[in-house]
Amino acid sequence: MKKEKIKIVTIGGGSSYTPELIEGFIKRKDELPIKEIWLVDIEDGKEKLEIVGAMAQRMVKAAGLDWKVNLTLDRREALKDADFVSTQFRVGLLDARIKDERIPLSHGIIGQETNGAGGMFKAFRTIPVILDIIDDMRELCPNAWLVNFTNPSGMVTEAAIKYGGWDRTVGLCNVPINCIEDDAKMLGVPSSELFFKFAGLNHFHWHRVWDKEGNEKTAEVIEKFYNPLLAEEKKDAGVANIKDIKFNYEQVKDLGILPCPYHRYYYITDDMLKEELESYSKGETRAEVVKRTEAELFELYKDPKLDYKPEQLTKRGGTHYSDAACELIASIYNDKRTTMVVSTKNNGALEDLPYDSIVEVSSTITSHGPEPINFGKFDPAPRGMVQIMKGMEETTISAAVTGNYNKALHAFTINPLVPSGQIAKDLLDEMLLAHKKHLPQFAERIEKLEKNK
């Protein structure tokens, strides 16, 4: 029996994304009988929590709702008897992301938040924390759903389920929603009149699309997006934090399915690296730009009259965040059977990946969680790529949990965006030292590196 009043906890509540989340809950006030929302952060995030928390309280009040919005630095206090726990935290804050991007670029290697060396180090810092959260949940809210938005979302979700044993975990990303809306716009119809099938991994998926008459429109979308000869060619599908560099039309046409915007890092690596190195030289990596954007947002959030989500938040890269997180919660609570793209157990939906692996796939969201929709087999090219990336993810997660240096080096070697050999080792060592504060599992190796400096 579902509860008549629910408690929602957001860990990383001081995030600039929180107003988007609150807006999403307000939009669904008739679907979600919320009693209280708890916004949780750490001491380093206290100021931001107080600013954005006060704004969240104003938004709820302006909507005429009696929800209680609590702010706390005590995670355990917040988690007690929670029904849904969403996670949107960043271990090391944006300064850690700047290191993830700038250190690889200083070696002439892709530096990106969720891809390559930067993405693996974000996993190293984040996975131990998500497992600590699950330990608290097991004691304080054993029936709660964990809605993970923390990047790298797929790896964090896999760690939560496989190593944390928390089967009630669902990973989310706003990128598939962006793709859906871009395709619909290109085809000139509302997205509700189209059917989509996504399959792959978080930030490494492909998809197909059909109209309501049952005609597949994938090839048409490929032509309209990527064929340079078409007069109606428009901007590539993408997201705010990825440079809009054109894919190779012939390659996408041969692929026959639509790539994720993040696939640019793998299909046109040299072009992306060149652009990143230019930004790096100007002190304008994406992390540095986001840090400035976020500072501007929090100045806006301080306004005691502001009681709605400002338009500037879209520049932060979180568009459709609330549509993902809040719709997932509403669909689970109400057994809505909504079709959403989530990171969840494969359960045979992708034949080319292990049955128990975590994949990002179109799923029907029920009261017992996601039921993945069968995608079948990939052709050899995407199959080879996704299997390599899954092996890299599994090795990265194992290294994050165990602190095993050799596994970390192996993950670097597998990753297509990191050169192998001495350069991989040098980069790994430099990043271990740079992130020492947030990598206790690697303490023994870091101490050895420091002695040998």
Image: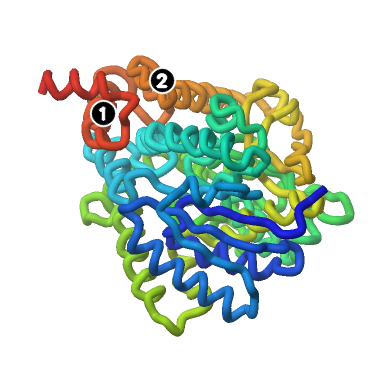
Residue 445 point in image, percent of width and height: 25, 19
Write the residue at 89% across / 55% down: 213
Write the residue at 31% across / 53% down: 44
Residue 411 point in image, percent of width and height: 41, 22
Look at mark 2 in the image and give the residue it sits on: 402
Mark 1 and mark 2 residues within 8 Å of each other at the beta carbon: no
Write the residue at 57% across / 31% down: 158
Quadrant for the C terminus, please.
top left
Check disc 1: other Cα within 10 Å, few if <14, some if 14-19, many if 20+: many
Q: Can residue 61 be seen in this view?
A: yes
Q: Distance between the residues labelled 1 and 2?
A: 20 Å
Is tag 1's residue or tag 2's residue first in the polypeptide sequence? 2
The numbered mark at residue 232 is none
Q: Residue furthest top?
A: 406
Write the residue at 70% across / 61% down: 184
Residue in front for this viewpoint, 432 or 216: 432
306 vs 109: above or below:
below
Mark 2 residue type: Thr
Look at mark 1 in the image and give the residue it sits on: 427
Q: Is residue 254 visible?
A: no
Which mark is nearer the camera, 1 or 2? 2
Q: Residue furthest bottom?
A: 305
The kind of secondary structure element at disc 1 is helix
The kind of secondary structure element at disc 2 is helix
Residue 87 point in image, percent of width and height: 52, 48
Residue 102 point in image, percent of width and height: 26, 44
